[in-house]
Structure formats: C-alpha cells, structure tokens
Image (tube, helix red, strand yellow):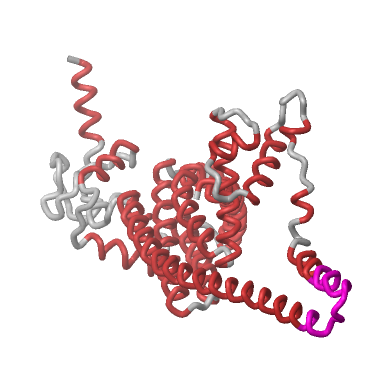
C-alpha cells in the first residue's frame, strides 16, 4: 500500500499545470492537453521517449514539416531549444527529420551521379577513339618514314639494315615505359620458402595484372603459381579494384571516386554524431543539459548541414562552378556559431572559444572517417 502511494505521488509530480507546448492552463490531472493534444508531462527528455516519437510517425508529415523546416533554417538553435523545453507537438522528431533529409540527399546524389556517369562514359568513348586514332597515326608515320628510307636508300645490302634500324628505333620509343616491367622478378619464383609477405604478394599481383588484365582471379593465381586460397583470391581482387579505380581517376579526374566518397562519408557521419554529442556534453559540462538534449541539437545542426549542402551541390552541378561550395562552408559555419550562441546561452567570447574547439574535434572525427571511407571506397567501389 505504501509503495502504491509513492508511485501515485511520483506520477502526480511529472504532470504540469501548464502545457509546455501551447502554454494553456491545465488542472494538473490531464494526460494530454485539450488544446494542442501534447502529452502533459514535465519529465526530462529520455531515450525511450525519443524513440517512441520516432516510431509513432517515421514517415508521417503534416503541417509540422513547415513549422520545423522554416525556423530550423532561419532561426539557428531555436527549434532545438523549443524541442527540449517541451514544445514538441509542433515539430518533427529530430532523428526522423535527419533520416528523411538524408534519404532525399542520397536520391539527389544518385540522380546527379547517373547523369555524370553517362557523360563520363561518352567522354571515355571519345578518349578511346582519340587513342585509337593516335595509334593509327603513329603506324602511318612509321610506314611513311620506312617508305621514304627505302626509296632513298641505295639498292644494296645496307637498305635492309637501315629499314631494320628505323623500325627498331620506333619500337624502342614505344616500349620504353614497359621495359622495367618486363624485368620484374616475381617473389613466388625467387622465394624458395614460399613464405611471401602480404606486400610482396601485392607486388606480384599488381605486376602480373598490368600485363594480363583479361585474366580471372583463378587464372592469374594458376599462372603465377600461387595457391587459390581465400586470402590470395581476396588480395588479387583488391588489386583488380585498385587498378580499375586508378584508371577511372585518370579518365575523369577523380569525379566518380569523389562521388562515391561523398556517399559513404555522408553515411559514416551518422555513426560519428553520438560521439560528437558526447563531446558537446563534456565542453558544456556546467550546463544542465542531458546527453539526449545535446543529441537533439546535433541532429538538427547536421540536418541543416545536409539541406544547405544539397542546395549548393545542385547549384554547383548546374553551373559547374566550385565557388558555391566555398559559400556553403562560410554560411554553415556562421549558422553553427549562431546556433551554439542561442541554444547554450553563453557569451560571445565563450561561444567563439568553444566554436573553435568543437570544429577542431569535428575535423578530427571527419578526418578519421575520411581516411576509413577513402580506403573502403577505393578498394570496394
């Protein structure tokens, strides 16, 4: 009986006499506000409440979309502040908003990538045609030079020697770049112990692939004399991917690789956001914010990052001008400063100092993510 009384009093304590969303007066025993429908509670934002809101309407947007988007963009920090203070019925769940904006971003990225890929394919065909024409022109020059030498050379035994020397000179120029490759000694041939390191295996596989690009993994390993183990097959497949990516970068200047990198990097940012929220809690340890409230702020800021980047990315794609990305970074940094200033309510000097610290930490996380994603994209794309 005593336990029930304590539990009843606790429930009474978390209900308010005023709706936190619309500020209408309440009697204190209502479960929901009769004016706006928001749950009558004064409890702190918790993880279970956060996920509950997410699952209740993951893809159901109504007028909340506009009451969230507009102030989120033009009033830095305001939506996050209102959300943690209890004004939640008018806004879309922060994680839901971030997820859906991310989906739209990847759709836009996929469409532009498809258009660019078609353009790259057309340019590659042109380059192959030019390369073929160039080879034909070289052969034509060799034939013309040889004909002139034959006509000008005396009709004796020296004519054959002169023609042979001319052809040898052309062959020397054409094979100069591949001469060193022919002299490569494979470790599988020279190492009698057959205990070859991973780096030396990559050397063998790379040199073999450059001269035998049409071979399958199994055919290549058989020709080299390597056993067709899981790791040897895996390493040779990575060599194939790496060489194809290098050739693609040479053809398009790295555009396709950069697009793949952007896609993976955007996904990886999601996994780093909880760490960034934890760092925010450490930087603002004197402020009475829970971890979830910091995370709400992080999700809102990252959503704006995606929205702004998507807008300027489309402008760059349409105009083919890189200057828009510089404008994007300047505007986003200004937005971040204003959001920190409003949300955490600290002086300009403290906000600027913490702004620098936070950006340094963010760049550190982004660098780690960039290295991991770059390696993954290069080997797996």
* Left or right for 111, reference 35: right
Residue 261 point in image, percent of width and height:
51, 55
- Does residue 153 show up magenta in the picture? yes
* Left or right for 356, reference 77: right
Q: Residue furthest front?
A: 156
Could you tell me which residue is drawn at 85 percent across and 73 percent down? 162
* Left or right for 86, reference 118: left
In front of the other: 224 or 318: 224
Could you tell me which residue is drawn at 66 percent across and 45 percent down? 208
Could you tell me which residue is drawn at 74 percent across and 33 percent down? 189
Q: Is residue 305 above or below residue 156?
A: above
In front of the other: 199 or 211: 211
Residue 5 point in image, percent of width and height:
19, 21
* Quarter-of-image position of residue 217: top right
Residues rendered magenta in the picture: 148-166
Q: Is residue 14 above or below residue 184?
A: above
Image quadrant for the N terminus? top left
Question: Which SS type dominates the magenta stretch?
Answer: helix
Could you tell me which residue is drawn at 48 percent across and 56 percent down? 260
* Left or right for 279, reference 299: right
- Does residue 242 show up magenta in the picture? no
Q: Is residue 369 visible?
A: no
Number of numbered discs visible in the structure rendering: 0
Q: Is residue 364 above or below residue 7?
A: below
Q: Is residue 190 visible?
A: yes
């Amino acid at each position: 009986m005593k336990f029930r009384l304590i539990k009843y009093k606790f429930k009474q304590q978390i209900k308010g006499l005023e709706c936190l969303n619309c500020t209408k007066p309440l009697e204190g025993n209502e479960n929901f506000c009769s004016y706006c429908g928001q749950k009558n509670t004064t409890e702190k934002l918790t993880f279970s409440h956060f996920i509950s809101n997410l699952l209740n309407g993951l893809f159901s947007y109504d007028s909340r979309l506009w009451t969230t988007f507009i102030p989120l963009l033009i009033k830095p920090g305001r939506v996050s502040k209102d959300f943690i203070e209890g004004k939640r019925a008018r806004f879309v769940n922060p994680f839901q908003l971030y997820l859906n904006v991310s989906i739209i971003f990847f759709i836009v990225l996929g469409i532009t990538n498809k258009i660019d890929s078609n353009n790259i394919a057309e340019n590659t065909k042109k380059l192959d045609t030019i390369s073929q024409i160039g080879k034909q022109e070289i052969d034509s020059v060799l034939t013309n030079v040889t004909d002139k030498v034959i006509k000008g050379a005396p009709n004796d035994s020296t004519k054959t020697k002169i023609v042979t020397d001319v052809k040898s000179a052309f062959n020397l120029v054409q094979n100069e770049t591949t001469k060193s490759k022919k002299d490569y000694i494979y470790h599988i041939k020279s190492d009698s112990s057959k205990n070859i390191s991973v780096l030396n295996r990559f050397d063998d596989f790379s040199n073999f692939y450059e001269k035998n690009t049409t071979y399958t993994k199994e055919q290549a390993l058989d020709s080299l004399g390597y056993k067709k183990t899981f790791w040897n097959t895996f390493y040779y497949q990575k060599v194939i991917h790496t060489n194809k990516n290098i050739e693609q970068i040479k053809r398009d200047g790295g555009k396709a690789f950069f697009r793949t990198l952007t896609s993976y990097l955007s996904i990886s940012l999601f996994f780093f956001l909880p760490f960034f929220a934890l760092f925010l809690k450490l930087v603002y340890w004197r402020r009475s914010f829970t971890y979830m409230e910091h995370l709400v702020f992080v999700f809102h800021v990252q959503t704006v990052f995606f929205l702004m980047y998507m807008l300027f990315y489309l402008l760059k794609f349409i105009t083919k001008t890189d200057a828009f990305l510089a404008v994007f970074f300047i505007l986003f940094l200004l937005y971040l400063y204003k959001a920190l200033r409003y949300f955490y309510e600290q002086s300009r000097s403290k906000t600027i100092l913490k702004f620098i610290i936070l950006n340094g930490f963010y760049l550190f996380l982004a660098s780690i993510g960039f290295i991991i994603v770059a390696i993954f994209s290069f080997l797996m794309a």
